[in-house]
Image (cartoon, grey):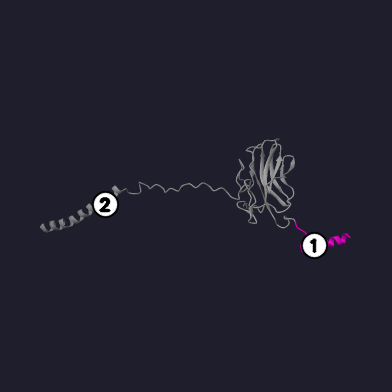
């Protein structure tokens, strides 16, 4: 009977009737955090909301599985499991950790964990740059209705998080300084009045030279 069961499973897998996990099918997801406090203190409990978005744009269609936060730091690894909120793809998790530096990753059910960043306690969370694109604006469910209403995910990793650095997905543009032309060198560039004076002197010199030619010839004839 055991061999027959194995054969049945293999046949179903061959014809595509056995569902595969999204992570095994090449799926990926991104976790976006709701705003955090400006400062995280050691030993205090905090609750933070987060969004698990398949392909960085929409909720997972199905049973996602366990989500939450995993912190690795002093004393080893700590895992905090989240609970679903009314909005699609929205969860909340409570955590408390001692002082130190913690590497934070998000548990995403079927999907591989998402590296969030580094949490300094006491201090703030520094987000890790990510190359995964995020596009939550205007995304709709089959073109019929938007996924989210007034409560919605940040538009990109790092939005709305006080004291956090912005993600490398959309690096902040450096402020543009006005380009000004270099001031002209007054010593090298002749001023208008100086140029006119030089022109008049040259003209006078030329007239004097022309005048001295006939005068010299007249004197020679008289002598």
> What number of labels is visible?
2
Q: Position of residue 207 (x, y in %)?
A: 20, 54
Magenta residues (range):
1-20
Which label was assigned to residue 199? 2
User: Are the residues tagged 1 and 2 within 8 Å (C-beta)?
Assistant: no
Q: Residue 43 is drawn in which quadrant?
A: top right
Q: Residue at x 84, y 60 (%)?
A: 6
Q: Residue at x 19, y 56 (%)?
A: 210
Q: Quadrant of the N terminus?
A: bottom right
Residue that extends furthest to the front in the rendered view of this protein: 144
Residue that extends furthest to the left in the rendered view of this protein: 222
- From the viewer's perspective, tell me whether residue 78 is left or right of residue 196: right
- 40 w.r.t. 211: above or below: above
Q: Nearer the viewer, residue 50 or 43?
A: 50
Indicate whether residue 13 is drawn in magenta.
yes
Q: Position of residue 191 (x, y in %)?
A: 32, 48
Task: Sort mark 2 into few (<14), some (14-19) or many (20+) by Cα contacts within 10 Å.
Answer: few
Q: Position of residue 121 (x, y in %)?
A: 67, 38
Task: Sort mark 1 into few (<14), some (14-19) or many (20+) by Cα contacts within 10 Å.
Answer: few
Q: Quadrant of the C terminus?
A: bottom left
Indicate whether residue 7 is drawn in magenta.
yes
N-terminal-most mark, 1 or 2? 1
SS type, badge 2: helix
Q: Nearer the viewer, mark 1 or mark 2?
A: 1
- From the viewer's perspective, tell me whether residue 118 is left or right of residue 3: left
Q: Main secondary structure of the magenta part?
A: helix
SS type, badge 1: helix
Which label was assigned to residue 12? 1
Q: Position of residue 98 (x, y in %)?
A: 71, 37
Q: Nearer the viewer, residue 131 or 16?
A: 16
Report, in whole angstroms, how far the alpha carbon at label 1 lies from the one at label 2. 101 Å
């Amino acid at each position: 009977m055991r061999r027959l069961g194995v054969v049945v499973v293999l046949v179903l897998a061959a014809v595509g009737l056995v569902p595969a996990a999204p992570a095994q099918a090449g799926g990926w997801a991104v976790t976006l955090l709701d705003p955090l406090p400006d400062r995280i203190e050691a030993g205090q409990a905090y609750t933070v909301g987060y969004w698990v978005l398949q392909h960085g744009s929409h909720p997972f269609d199905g049973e996602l599985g366990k989500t939450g936060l995993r912190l690795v730091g002093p004393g080893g690894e700590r895992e905090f499991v989240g609970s679903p909120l009314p909005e699609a793809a929205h969860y909340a998790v409570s955590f408390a950790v001692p002082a130190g530096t913690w590497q934070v990753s998000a548990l995403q059910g079927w999907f591989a964990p998402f590296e969030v960043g580094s949490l300094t306690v006491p201090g703030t969370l520094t987000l890790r740059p990510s190359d995964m694109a995020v596009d939550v604006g205007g995304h709709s469910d089959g073109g019929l209705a938007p996924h989210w209403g007034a409560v919605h995910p940040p538009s990109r990793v790092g939005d709305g998080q006080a004291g956090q650095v912005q993600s490398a997905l959309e690096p902040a543009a450096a402020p543009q300084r006005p380009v000004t032309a270099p001031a002209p060198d007054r010593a090298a560039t002749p001023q208008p009045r100086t140029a006119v004076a030089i022109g008049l002197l040259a003209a006078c010199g030329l007239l004097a030279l022309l005048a001295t030619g006939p005068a010299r010839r007249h004197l020679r004839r008289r002598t």
